Amino acid sequence: MQPTPARASAILWTVNLASIAASVFTYVYLAYYVYTTTGSLVLSEAVVLAPMVIPVLMCLAINRIAGSGSPRGILMAANAAGLLVAFVTYMTVERHFAVALVGALLIGLVDAIQRVARTVAIKRYFAAADVKYAVPITLTAQFIAGAIAGVALSFYQGEVTPRVAAAITVSGFLVAAAAAALLPGLPSLAASGNAPQLKGLGTVGTLKALLAQDVQLRRHFMAFVIVVSTLQGFFNVSRVALPLHVLQLPQSFVGYLQIIGATAALIAALAFALLGRVGLALGRRTTALITTACLFAMVGATTSHNVAASYTLYALYMFSWEILFFKYQSDLVNATPSERMALVATFQYAAVYAGMLMTGLAGGFVVEAVGLPLCATAFALVYLSAMSWNVASTGRATESVRDAVATTR
């Protein structure tokens, strides 16, 4: 039986909140534990980066797992696996600190599977008209979860032992698994024959064929990748560099900027959900205005040496880029056939993580060479160029399809 949108939203929100809080807590705590144990920033950073690498390296396996059953079954199994991995990791990390890296990799795999499964769940549990409401509402839990994990570790880092961390993380995954069990059961698309299981490069070929045949889907897919790779990529580059290197502020202001960014993102999610609830969609002109505000605020935040002005502009940047994120994510979900949602979602996340790794690395070099303001300008120009190319290339493809149709007639 199809659940009501409100009930499905509440369940997915709880799954998101509990599982993401457990995952983020694990990444941050294990990185902190490795640093205090070994004194190595390299090893600590490896723990943080491990979950970002997993969706890229394991995309074929993630697609196969996430598309192999119903959303309820996948989410329950993933959280049960996360619970087991967390317990083993925390119980053994004091004897072998290298277990922290293995644990972060495995939790990253669980997290990646859940991200795809949650997207599939939104597609299957919600009507097309409700997607613009469901996407931001379920993702508000992500911002809150990250804030909870960060605040908990900031204030109680010294008191949290591996055993206490195990209790916190296991509890989070347990709550997520229990919440997922409340979702109505749906037959797997693979079992019904609507989503044939492909292996290896056949999966990649299917995605390429799908994007080649459906020009609008390709436009939405590439737009989402561009938006997240550049705008989230700049966030990753700037969240420490802006307060410490540009504004020359104490380290505590890094935390304040995180709070401001998370709050702006949360407000954006609620605002976009309200727009979807009342049936208002963002047209081209409105989207262009939001994009202009986002890029202006991104550059302005790095050029102002007044703390209040800089942080206000940064909040505007976070708000507007999150609105763009929800728009392009909703467009992509609506444009994707249900039987291909797992495939598209898997490679969407693989592409954006690869993009963020590249923009983060390039951004770091640019900041060191010419500073954050010029880095922000470069990111804005890359964004505009990439989006213009995407519109132009898909426009040409649409014209080619129309010509082909006219010729056959």
Image (cartoon, rainbow, N blue to C red):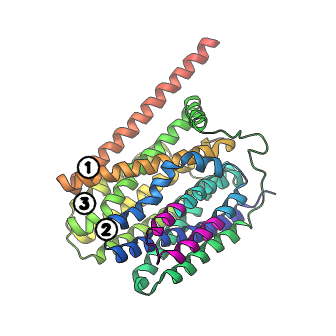
Residue ID for mark 1: 377
**Badge 3 or badge 1: first in the primary sequence:** 3
Residue ID for mark 3: 302
Farthest residue toward the right? 1
Task: Please give the name of the residue rendered at 71% of the width and 38% of the height, measured from the top-left corner.
Answer: 196
Q: Is residue 291 above or below residue 337?
A: below
**Three-letter code, disc 2:** Leu
| Prevailing SS of the magenta stretch | helix
Q: Nearer the viewer, residue 232 or 173?
A: 173
Residue ID for mark 2: 41
Task: Please give the name of the residue rendered at 49% of the width and 48% of the height, measured from the top-left corner.
Answer: 57
Farthest residue toward the front? 95
Q: Is residue 13 above or below residue 224?
A: below
- For this view, does 153 lie left or right of residue 74? left
**Three-letter code, disc 1:** Thr
Is residue 97 highlighted in magenta? Answer: yes
Looking at the rendered structure, the secondary structure element under dot 2 is: helix
Give the x, y percent position of residue 179.
69, 70
Task: Please give the name of the residue rendered at 58% of the width and 60% of the height, measured from the top-left corner.
Answer: 110
- Which class describes the residues within 10 Å of circle 3: few (<14), some (14-19), or many (20+)? many
Q: Can residue 211 be seen in this snapshot?
A: yes
